[in-house]
Image (spheres, rainbow, N blue to C red):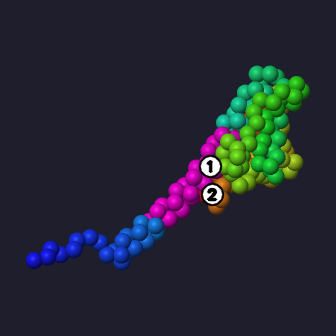
């Protein structure tokens, strides 16, 4: 008596491969969204730290500090104004430190000035607080800061 043939049919194998592909596709989409949120959040947190560092540098050097945003190329720099010493340069984008699609300092002129006492000039701000927005895909994180450099990071 012949034993029955064991194994999987072509239909069963195809069904398993299709289900595996769908599962991997959904996982990749979820992971991509997570990476975008993480990038925007990291950029906002780094800027908040850099704002604190710029304030400390201004007070230590007793020299004004300038934080200049270059929104079209997605980067900013922190520079001692009188000596023109660049303290920090942060690049964002595909081939940069953090992958972002947009960086926006919501002040006219896209430049922050800190005086030698470390006080931020918010005269060009649209409200009582300065605002910087970091975007990666649909994820946005906002840094709100006051004249003393105290900041909070909010995401949506």
Does the stretch in magenta take in 127? Answer: no
Please report whichever mark, 1 or 2, sits nearer to the chain's N-terminal start: 1
| Main SS category, magenta section | helix
Q: Which residue is at the front of the view, 125 or 38?
A: 38
Q: Residue 39 has which mark?
A: 1
The residue at the point 71 percent across, 55 percent down is: 101
Image point 77% across, 44% down: which residue? Answer: 75
Q: Which residue is mark 2?
A: 139
* Real-space Cα separation, disc 1 to disc 2, in angstroms: 9 Å
| Residue sitting farthest toward the front | 1
What is the x, y in percent for residue 11?
36, 77
Span highlighted in magenta in the image: 23-47
Residue 67, can we see it? yes
The structure residue drawn at horizontal position 69% and vertical position 33%, both measured from the top left corner, is 52
Helix, strand or loop status at disc 1: helix
154 to 3, vertically: above or below: above
Left or right: where does residue 109 sit relative to residue 142? right
- 1 or 2: mark nearer the eye: 1
- Whether 115 is drawn above or below 123: the answer is above
Label 2 environment density (alpha carbons within 10 Å; few <14, some 14–19, many ≥20): many
Residue 54 point in image, percent of width and height: 75, 32
């Amino acid at each position: 008596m012949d034993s029955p043939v064991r194994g999987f049919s072509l239909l069963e194998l195809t069904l398993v491969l299709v289900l595996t592909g769908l599962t991997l596709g959904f996982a990749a989409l979820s992971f991509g969204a997570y990476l975008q949120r993480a990038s925007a959040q990291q950029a906002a947190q780094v800027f908040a730290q850099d704002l604190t560092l710029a304030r400390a540098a201004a007070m230590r050097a007793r020299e004004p500090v300038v934080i200049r945003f270059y929104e079209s190329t997605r980067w900013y720099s922190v520079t001692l104004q009188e000596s023109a010493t660049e303290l920090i340069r942060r690049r964002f984008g595909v081939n940069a430190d953090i992958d972002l699609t947009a960086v926006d300092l919501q002040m006219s002129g896209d430049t922050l000035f800190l005086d030698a006492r470390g006080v931020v000039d918010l005269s060009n701000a649209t409200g009582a607080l300065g605002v910087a927005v970091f975007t990666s895909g649909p994820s946005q994180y906002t840094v709100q800061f006051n004249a003393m450099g105290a900041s909070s990071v909010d995401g949506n």
